[in-house]
Amino acid sequence: MDINVKKIGETEEEYIEIGCHVRDGRINDIVRFVENLEGNISGTKGEKKYAIPVTEIFYIESVDNKTFIYSSKDCYETTRKLYEFEELLKGRSFLRISKSVVLNIMKVDSIKPALNGRFSCILRNGEEVIISRKYVNPFKEFISKKV
Amino acid sequence: MKENIKDNLMNFFIIVTLVNIVIFVCGSIFAPDQEITYSAFLVPIIDGALGIIPGIVMYSKRELTVKQMIVREVIQLLSIELIILIFTFGINGLKIENLTLIIAEMVSIAVVFVLVIVIRYFFDKRSAKIMTSDLKEFQRSFSAKESRD
């Protein structure tokens, strides 16, 4: 595959164009990668596909081998695995808080104790997600480090 | 596993302290003239060690739901009651004649068990307060960094 990078004028809008014979998984990977760089993650709701801005994501959850992205009010399904998101969103405000949840720390309003050494995060939309015991210390370290 | 060891150690020390208090309170009320020997100092430590056995045995790596956790706590309480009653009275000592003492011991165990949970809750509440304050600070500095970039 040839890669052409062309410089354009300051007044023009930057773009990426892909020339391909078939839009296969390889091309979709490139599209997803670029979307992520732009700060969007793709997800589906019903039959429709959406580009969800990373800053609008509250948390990402894995349930029965399916991965769901939650925003303030909406829930989108994605084909990616939770560990991929954990890797992809490293260095941003996202952190794994249990076996099945990656949380956007910026969407947490407060923290309260839950049963048995676990903690519950109250999100800005009123939802609650649990930090399991194993992830409590990494969570404490993450939020107490200097940005 | 590390968290479980830490939890059980903390529970052990809380139980030892509470059993000391229970011995003092019950002793002062029901047997104020009773003289005790040095070996009595071992009772809270042994009770503490026996009290954490069910927690160690029932440790699960799985994330339990609230319902499962409540069931586990109830099973743990019943196991602790049984272990400590057998330790105190022996299997042959669990008779009708000792019923009042057995009931008093069972109530004391249940009170200590609940108090351990309550004390742990207050520790966690304090941690949660510190975490919330760290979180707010993190969010402020992260937002500032985002707007700088």
Image (spheres, rainbow, N blue to C red):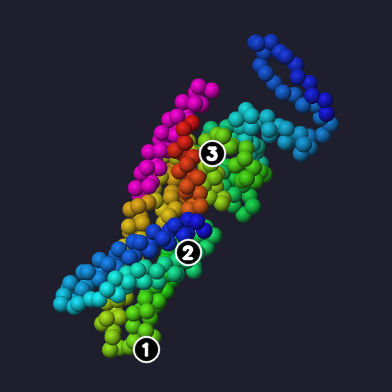
Residue that numbered label 2 is attached to: B68
Mark 1–mark 3 Cα distance, whole angstroms, equals 59 Å
Q: Answer whether residue B124 is magenta in the image.
A: no
Residue that numbered label 1 is attached to: B92
Mark 1–mark 2 Cα distance, whole angstroms, equals 34 Å
**Chain bearing mark 3:** A
Identity of the amino acid at label 1? Asn
Assess disc 2: are there few (<14), some (14-19) or many (≥20) residues with their C-alpha within 10 Å of its C-alpha.
Answer: few
State if disc 2 and disc 3 touch (CB < 8 Å): no
N-term-proximal mark, 1 vs 2: 2
Assess disc 1: are there few (<14), some (14-19) or many (≥20) residues with their C-alpha within 10 Å of its C-alpha.
Answer: few
Q: What stretch is highlighted in magenta?
A: B125-149
Residue that numbered label 3 is attached to: A94
Q: Position of residue A117 (x, y in %)?
A: 43, 55
Q: Please name whichever residue, B40 or B99, is drawn nearer the observer in this view of the structure.
A: B40
Q: What mark, if any, has residue B65 been given in the picture?
A: none
Q: Residue at x 37, y 51 (%)?
A: B124
**Chain bearing mark 1:** B
Q: Please name whichever residue, B119 or A76, is drawn nearer the observer in this view of the structure.
A: B119
Q: Residue at x 40, y 42 (%)?
A: B131
Q: Answer whether residue B137 is magenta in the image.
A: yes
**Chain bearing mark 2:** B
- B103 to A58, vertically: above or below: below
Q: Is the magenta stretch mostly helix, strand or loop?
A: helix
- B103 to B113, vertically: above or below: below
